[in-house]
Amino acid sequence: MRSVPYRPEIDGLRAVAVLGVLAYHAAGIVPGGFAGVDVFFVISGYVITSVIAAELSRGEFTIARFYERRIRRIAPALLATIFVTTIGAAIFLLPADLISFGKSAVAATLMVSNIGFWLKAGYFDAAMQSKPLLHTWSLGIEEQFYLFYPLLLAWLWRRRPRAVAPVLAGLFVVSLAAGIVATDALPSAAFYLAPFRLWELLLGGLIALRPVRRLEGAGAAAVGALMIAAAFTFYGGATAFPGVAALLPTLGAALVINGASKGGLVARLLSAPPLTFVGKISYSLYLVHWPLIVFIEYRQGAELGPWQAAGVAALSILLAALSWRLVEQPFRRPERFGSRRALYSAGAAGAAVCCLAGGVLVVTHGLPSRLPEPVLAAYSAHGDRWNEERCFIDTDGSGGPTPAEIRAGKICTFGPADRTTADFLIWGDSHAHAIAPGILAAAKRFGARGYFVGAGSCPPLREFDTVGVRPSTERRCAETNAAVLDFLRTHKVGAVFMVARWTKYAQGNEYGREGMMFDPAKVPGAVPGEDAKLAAAMDETLSQIVAGGEKPVVVMAVPEPGYDVPYSVAKALLQRTPPDAIAPTLEAVAARQARARDILTEETEKDGGLFVDPTAALCGPVVCPVEQDGQLLYSDADHITIGAALAISYIFDDAFRQIMKGSR
C-alpha cells in the first residue's frame, strides 16, 4: 500500500528535468538544461519528505526501513552503471584519465563523488569529456543530505513537532545564503558540496510539509512551468550557478508541485503517458546517458553531431527502459532479498566489486600495458608542467602566495643563493607558469636571480577585467596584481617579464571550444572593445613599472593549436592517422595574434621596454608544429611543455644581456 498518493504529474516533472539534462549534454540545444538537476533536487525533497511524514503520522517510520528503501531505489542501477562504465573506461580511456576514472568509481560507489570532483576542480583539471561518472556528483549530494535529514525530521516530529517547519526553514535560509556567497567566492565548492545545495532539497520538503494553499491551482503551476522553461532557455555556461540563479528553476519546480496538486492544464500535460513513462525511467536515464556521450566524444575527439545526438538520446532511453525493467524494478520488490541482512549483504558485495575494479585501475596506473609505447609517450605530455605549483595561484584561489605575502616579498625566488638583490620578476597568468622554465634557464646562464608570481586567468595588468571569468576570479586577479605592483614599489628587481595569453585578452575569447572538442571552423570572432581595453591597461601598467625604475620585458603569447595536443596525438597514433594534422598554419597563427602583437609592440616601444616573441622559435615557414623530434611541444591546447620552454630559452638571452649589463 502506498504511504502517499501517486501523483503522475510528478513523474512528468521528472521527465522534463531529465530531458533538459539530456538535451543539454547531448546536443546543447537547451543551454540551461543543466538546471534540470536542481528540479530533481526539489522533487526528491518533496517525495522523500512526503513519505517520511506520512509514516511518522501513522507511527510507522523507522530509520532501518528508510535506508532499506534508499538502497533498493538507488544502489542496483547505480552499481550496474558503475560496473559497465568501468569496462567501457578500460577500453576507451587513456591511462591518466583511467586513473582518474578509477578514483571516481570508488567515490561514486561510496556516494562521495561530489567531494572528489570538487577536490580535483581547478585550472589544470581534466576536461569534463574525460569523466564518465561526473554526473554522479548530484547523487552524492542527495545521499549525504539523507544521512542526516530523516534523523532530524523524525526527532523534531516526535520531540518538537511545532519546530519542524521553522527549523527546516531556518536551514533553508542558511544554506541558500551560504550558496549565494560561495557561488561568487568559492564557485567549485558551491557547485559540488552538499551544504551549499541542501536548500534545494529542503525547498521540496517544506512544500510537502506546508503546502501554500494560496498557490494551489493551475495559475501557480503555469508560472512555475514558465520559470523552469526560462531557466532552460536563458541560462548557459556563463551563468553564475547555483547561487541566486538556481532560485528560478527550483522555485519553478516548487510552484509546479504545489500548484498542480489541484489539477489544471500543467498537471494534465505532465500526466501524459509518454512523460510519465520517461519520468519513471528518469533515474536510469540520468545514469546511462552521460557515459555514452563521454565515450563517443572521447573516441572521436569532437562533439556529437545532430544525428549522433539524436541516436544517443534514443539509445539512452532504450537502455534506461531496460535498466528500469531488469534492474530497478526487481530490486524494489520486497521478495527480492527479502531480509534486510540479505539486502545489505548484496549491496555491500556489489559496492565491493565496484570499489575493487576502480582500485585496480588506480594501482595499475591506468593499465598502460594496453597501449603501444608511442601512444603512452605522447599522452604523458599532459603532465609535462613546471612542478613549482607553490608559486602559482590557481583560479579557485588555492596554491601560491597571498597578496600580503607578495607585498612582503615572500614569493618564489630562483638563482644564486649568495645574491642579495634580484634582477628580474616573472609575472603573469598560466602561460607565465608554462614558459618560466625557459626564462629561468636563460637567467641561470647569466647568473641572474629573480622572482616568480603567477595566477590562473590573470594577465599582468592593473585593473583589467577578463571577459568570461567569475567575479571571484576578477577580484583575485585585481588583488594579486595590485600586490605585485606594490611589491615593485618597495623591491628593486631590474626587469619585469610580463607573460600572458595576450591573444585571449586582446580578442576577448579563447580559441573556440578548445581541447578535446576543438573545431577550427567554430572559432568565434573578437569581442568588440577588448583590444582597446587591453591597450589602455597595458599603457597604464607599463607606465607604472617604468616609473619605478624597472624595465618591462613583454613576452608574446605562444602559438595556440586549439586542439588538446597530447590527447589528439595519442588518439591519432591509436587510429593510425597523421598526428601533424592538428598543427596550426603560420598564417592562422599570425591572424590570431595580429591585434595582440600590434598592441604589445606599440606599448612596449613607447615605454622603452623589450619585446620577446617565441613564435619564430616554435613555427616553421608554413606550420607551427606540435611536436619536434618525437617530443610534444604542448601539454594541452595552448600551454607549452617544460621541454619546449627549455628548447626556446635562447630567445631570452638578449633580454638578459641587457638586464645584467644594466645591473653591473
Image (cartoon, rainbow, N blue to C red):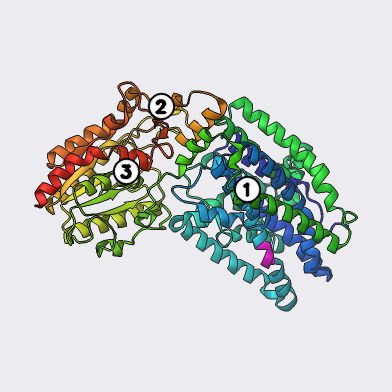
Looking at marks 1 and 3 on the same chain, the residue that comes earlier in the sequence is marked by: 1
Q: Is residue 141 visible?
A: yes
- Secondary element under disc 1, as helix, strand or loop, is helix
Looking at the picture, how far across and down is residue 220, in whole percent? 65, 50
- Is disc 1 surrounded by few (<14), some (14 to 19) or many (20+) residues within 10 Å? many
Q: Is residue 537 above or below residue 196?
A: above
Towards the viewer: 466 or 420 = 420
The mark closer to the camera, 1 or 3, is: 1
Looking at the picture, how far across and down is residue 496, in whole percent? 20, 49
According to the picture, the residue beneath numbered tag 3 turns out to be 435
Tag 2: amino acid: Ala
According to the picture, the residue beneath numbered tag 1 turns out to be 361
According to the picture, the residue beneath numbered tag 2 turns out to be 583
- In the rendered image, residue 441 lying in the magenta stretch gets the answer no
Q: Is residue 267 visible?
A: no
Tag 1: amino acid: Leu
Q: Give the CA distance from mark 2 to mark 1.
A: 32 Å
- Secondary element under disc 2, as helix, strand or loop, is loop
Q: Main secondary structure of the magenta part?
A: helix
Tag 3: amino acid: Ile
Q: Residue at x 83, y 53 (%)?
A: 332
- Is disc 3 surrounded by few (<14), some (14 to 19) or many (20+) residues within 10 Å? many
Towards the viewer: 65 or 300 = 300
Looking at the picture, how far across and down is residue 331, in whole percent? 83, 51
Look at the image and give the residue range highlighted in magenta: 145-149
